[in-house]
Amino acid sequence: MNFKRRATAAAAVLAVASAGLVAVQATAEATQPRPQAHARPQACPDLTVSAGWYGHNKARLQQMIDRYGDCGPHHRRGGARPVATFDWDNTVIKNDVGDATMFWLLRNGRIRTPEKGDWHTTSRYLTDPAAKALAKACPASGTTLPTHRDTACADEILSVYGEGTTTTGTAAFAGFDHRRMEPQYAWLAQLTRGWSTHQVKRFAAAARKENLAAPVGTEQRVGSGRVTGWVRYYDQQRDLIRTLKKAGFDVYVVSASPEPVAEVWAEGVGIDARHTLGIRNVTAHGRHTAHLKGCGTVADGDDSMITYIDGKRCWINKEIYGVRGAAAEKVQPAHKRQVFAAGDSDTDISFLRDATALRLVLNRNKNELMCRAYENGDGRWLVNPMFIEPKGKKADAYPCATTGYTERDGRQGPVRRSDGSVVPDQRDTVYGASRPSSAP
């Protein structure tokens, strides 16, 4: 996610990636593993977009498609189709659809007043200072909050959602498992309380229309501030998803945005609701409640696990492979895991590690993800600069051996391999540089 990861709109560069845009170190490309030559079956579909792919990444993806698709030697006739799983925000698109939806809700006054005016009912992890700050900024007056004209209320909600703090800097959430829950992400889904799924999808569709129509670099006013106001699909990922589906893969989106929101956007790359996983609300009388569906050992309404880090693994195991109970939270045998996965952040690390053939990482300088991707212990990690506004080289090494891993209690520690040994610090070698573009 973009806004929620502190990548504010003020830092956005007005640039779009195009052929020849990405500039990477020649030494890194020279050391990247080359795909092994193989005789391609004639019936295999081809990736058609070449611009933006780093080194041999496109060739290795094509080789995977040729091997595991309907036309390849690893195709299991009469058996289960190979699975490909994609994170959504900043993996398939540039920017964040959860952010886009939250901004739209605030600009249009579509957030319901909390039950009995108590903000604690919107999240079990909301701190007392945050609940008091929200109650003061957003006094209960009617069914919905007037955030379209009350800037103080909009600012307080936006700060809690985007920064995880009140406008005075006090922590807004506490007491959660940092490997299963991000309460800021969950809060957006919880703030859809009182609306039906159909209504939430209409809100997301309105935000989608605005953000796709807005020129690259657009900012919009929410409350008293300005935030990101544009989104773009990555042509390279559209092409990859299209080719995977044509080759017989079951392609899924696994997002830490509310599921109805992710569904609206996923339709743009040909992925239907049945193949879209996100944060799910418990419903009552056809409307969303502020409680969330559970997975594994987490019951519905417990609100302690979403599609986030280990939670993404759980939901993949549950919804795609039919694994139930405590087993859904664990790594499954190879035949019950996705062949391919793509992501951009530490929130994706568990389901990326589960992929058995290739793991595509878009480099956003996220510590644990880049530590594992750059070490590339099994040769199955592919690192690519972002296709739009790629990040430049990270000056310092990733702190893999000291603080690259986030523990369940939020403390930072070393990134460890499966055998417990520590991953050494890694240097950034696959990065990009952007140049100004006059095109919208």
Image (cartoon, rainbow, N blue to C red):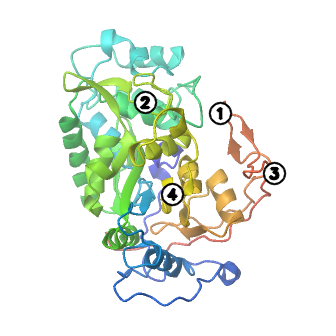
Element under label 2? loop
Residue 401 in the image: x percent, y percent? 80, 51
Q: Which of the two labelled residues, at mark 3 and mark 4, occupies the earlier sequence position?
A: 4
Q: Residues within 10 Å of mark 4 (few under 14, many from 20)?
A: few
* Distance (Cα) linking label 3 and label 2: 32 Å
**Amino acid at circle 2:** Gly
**Amino acid at circle 3:** Ser
Q: Which of the two labelled residues, at mark 4 and mark 2, occupies the earlier sequence position?
A: 2
Q: Residues within 10 Å of mark 2 (few under 14, many from 20)?
A: many
Of badges 1 and 3, nearer the viewer stands 3
The residue shown at (49%, 63%) is 340
Residue found at the far front of this picture: 78
**Amino acid at circle 4:** His
Specify whether 114 is left or right of 175: left
Element under label 4? helix
Q: Which residue is mark 2?
A: 294
Is the Cβ of the residue at disc 4 closer than 8 Å to that at disc 2?
no
* Distance (Cα) linking label 3 and label 4: 27 Å
Q: Is residue 34 above or below residue 341?
A: below
Whether residue 261 is visible to the viewer of this picture, yes or no, is yes
Q: Which residue is mark 3?
A: 421
* Distance (Cα) linking label 2 and label 1: 18 Å
Of badges 1 and 4, nearer the viewer stands 4
**Can you tell which mark lies on residue 209?**
none
Q: Which residue is mark 4?
A: 335
**Amino acid at circle 1:** Arg
Q: Which of the two labelled residues, at mark 3 and mark 2, occupies the earlier sequence position?
A: 2
Q: Which residue is mark 1?
A: 408
